Amino acid sequence: MDILNPFECSEEKAWCPGCGNHALLEGIKRALFELEKEPHEVLIASGIGQAAKLPHYINTNGFNGLHGRAVPPAAGAKIANSDLTVIIHTGDGDSYGEGGNHLIHNIRRNLDLTHFVHDNQIYGLTKGQASPTTGKGHITGIQTEGVQLEPFNPIALGISLDCSFVARTFVGDQEHMVETMKSAIRHSGYALVDILQPCVVFNKVNTFKWYKDRVYHLERDHDVSDKVEAFRRAQEFGERIPIGIFYVNEKPTYMESVEYISEREPLVRKKLDPKSAVPLMDEFY
Ligand SMILES: Cc1ncc(C[n+]2csc(CCOP(=O)(O)OP(=O)(O)O)c2C)c(N)n1
Ligand code: SF4
């Protein structure tokens, strides 16, 4: 244990040895430490799944909600306390399946949230059913003849919705992952980062080696403001898989663009006056 890192937590982890979540957890602790954040300044919100256990294993504020519902409480916390660094950790099933609607509309709202999707291309916690990112033809215990549907493309979705920051990284490239995490956390606006990770038990197709053999860095001169080129690169997922920051679209955040919020003090700084509740209690009692 690195006693110098205030994000360390001694809670025993309920993940298999070799699960990509271990490297991801180490990466987020390092990213926050290198950004000189303090544990009390950070909130990590998650839903349900193996990925969603992450707030249990890091020393920050945490919110563990319902499957697919990590984004709304994260958005609420940010609106109530804009000083917080709010980070969402979800699985691919959690955010691209059940919680897809929240993802879409929060990309549109552009709150200053960082969203890390642990993409193991499978439902890990519920024992290996296909998720939206599982490849076509992949045989699982339920999809016994192979997945019939085309996989969901989160990078293309983010770019098409003009998401303000869209990136992909891989747990097997720790330097790249930590730097991408730091850029996403520093970014003002909704930052969506798809993080490729193996599930060593239930995904025998997209293994660590499978990813390692395919991922390569987007070129240094990749123009993150070029939406058409970013979209073109987002189509590449097969024998070669680009990782890096695909698209950055600087625009006002929700807090800046909604007058009702931007003109008022965040809720968390308002003085409480318990007496002001009395007329309401009288009215409804
Ligand atoms: C509303 C609801 N639907 C379904 C479930 C069952 N469920 C729990 S976790 C999960 C899938 C988790 O997969 P993913 O989000 O990809 O995360 P992973 O476990 O792979 O990290 C499902 C379907 C649930 N708990 N609640
Ligand atoms: S089943 Fe898969 S996702 Fe769950 S802890 Fe094990 S390796 Fe990780």
Image: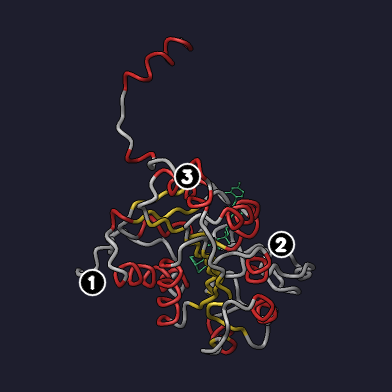
Residue at x-position 45% and y-position 67%: 187
Circles 3 and 1: CB atoms closer than 8 Å: no
Q: Is label 2 or label 3 in front?
A: 3
Ranked by sequence position, the earlier of labels 3 and 1 is: 1
Q: Is label 3 or label 1 in front?
A: 3
Q: Amino acid at mark 2?
A: Ile
In this rendering, position of residue 58 left or right of residue 195: left
The residue that label 3 is drawn on is 76
Q: Determine the secondary structure under disc 1.
A: loop
Circles 2 and 3: CB atoms closer than 8 Å: no
Residue 91, quarter of picture:
bottom right
| Residue 13 on image: x %, y % | 37, 62
Q: Spatial distance from mark 3 to mark 1, Cα to Cα? A: 32 Å
Q: Spatial distance from mark 2 to mark 1, Cα to Cα? A: 42 Å
Q: Determine the secondary structure under disc 3.
A: helix
The residue that label 2 is drawn on is 142
Q: Spatial distance from mark 2 to mark 3, Cα to Cα? A: 36 Å
In this rendering, position of residue 279 left or right of residue 170: left
Q: Determine the secondary structure under disc 2.
A: loop
Quadrant containing the N terminus is bottom left
Q: Residues within 10 Å of mark 1 (few under 14, many from 20)?
A: few
Q: Is residue 230 above or below residue 9?
A: below
Residue extending farthest to the left is 3
Return the mark for residue 2: 1
Ranked by sequence position, the earlier of labels 2 and 3 is: 3
